[in-house]
Image (cartoon, rainbow, N blue to C red):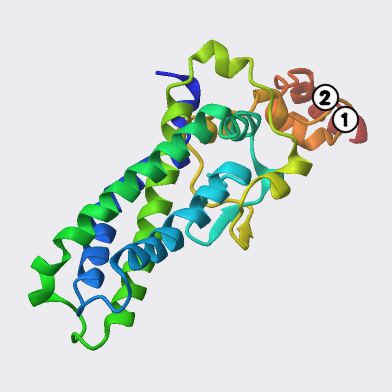
Amino acid sequence: MRSFWSDPFLWIHLSGAATLPIFLGLCLLGLAVGSPLLPVWLEMFLVAVAGIVPVLWMQWFRPFYIFSILVVAVKPQNLTSVQHRILTRFKTNLNKGLALFVAVLLAVILWQLYRFAPLAASVAPFPPSWRWAGLLLAASAFLASNLFLQVSASVMPVLLTPESEFAATKPHVVEKIRQDFTIAPWQVDRLLPALAAETTAAVAAPVESIRPASGGNSSVDSIVNPKPADTNGVTSLPEQSIEKK
């Protein structure tokens, strides 16, 4: 197991591909509404552009900031050095090529959905006269399909990076993260609970940290390091009382 595999954000966004059948199903239902109002190629083109171009542009020029969930993100200055290296891995040419491949793959899938859309006309969510509403639903669902699959696909090369290559990766500069990545608007200090290893390291403080410094409060020092009882004190009290008599 590679050391950076313990980061939960990688696995959360990798699992986002599981939502692909849901959004493709919604896209199919949208295309099934009514009959085409425009030439088939033009409707296909509009839905494809609306779904593919924004996400492909993002992944090429300002990749999705992986340390976020929906509209909430971890502040860049709160990331660890390992997480900065992970960000650097998302800016490779391999990820750009993979984003292009995913875009072409989804375009082919969209064409197949368009072909089989009439078979789902009986379960279309809108009446046949609402063709534009159906196209809007199809474009929105296809956009979501691109977003979730593109982000999940971009995680795969990072996870498959050899440990030695990852260790040699330079951490991404903190000051450039906001301009190099697409970050959610709502940013917080911490988004997920700390890992068990981090919590254990924080709790296991040195024993010396609970001891007072030299020259400190003597009462506290007597509790930590109690002195043996003074045996001479027992006999000194009777001697003083005899002298007074």
CA–CA distance between discs 1 and 2?
6 Å
For the residues labelled 1 and 2, say whether their Cβ atoms are less than 8 Å apart.
yes
Position of residue 165 in the picture relative to residue 99 (left or right):
right
Identified at 57% across, 28% down, the residue is: 93
The reply, left or right, for residue 24 in relation to residue 77 is left
Figure quadrant of residue 183: bottom right
Q: Nearer the viewer, residue 62 or 103?
A: 103
Callout 1, which amino acid?
Answer: Gln
Quadrant (top left, top right, bottom left, bottom right) of the C terminus: top right
Up the image or down, 140 lies above or below 8; here it is below
SS class, disc 2: helix
Residue 152 position, x and y percent, is 40, 42
Q: Which residue is more in the foreground, 24 or 178?
A: 24
Please tell me the numbered disc located at residue 140.
none
Residue beneath disc 1? 240
In the image, taking residue 170 as reference, residue 29 lies left or right, namely left
Q: Which residue is mark 2?
A: 236
Outermost residue toward the front in this view:
39
From this view, report whether residue 206 is shown above or below residue 62.
above
Q: Position of residue 111 (x, y in %)?
A: 26, 54
Residue displayed at 57% across by 54% down: 73
**Element under disc 1:** helix
Percent from the top left, x then y, of residue 76? 68, 46
From the viewer's side, name the closer residue of 42 and 84: 42
Name which residue lies at 39% across and 41% down. Answer: 102
Q: Quadrant of the N terminus?
A: top left
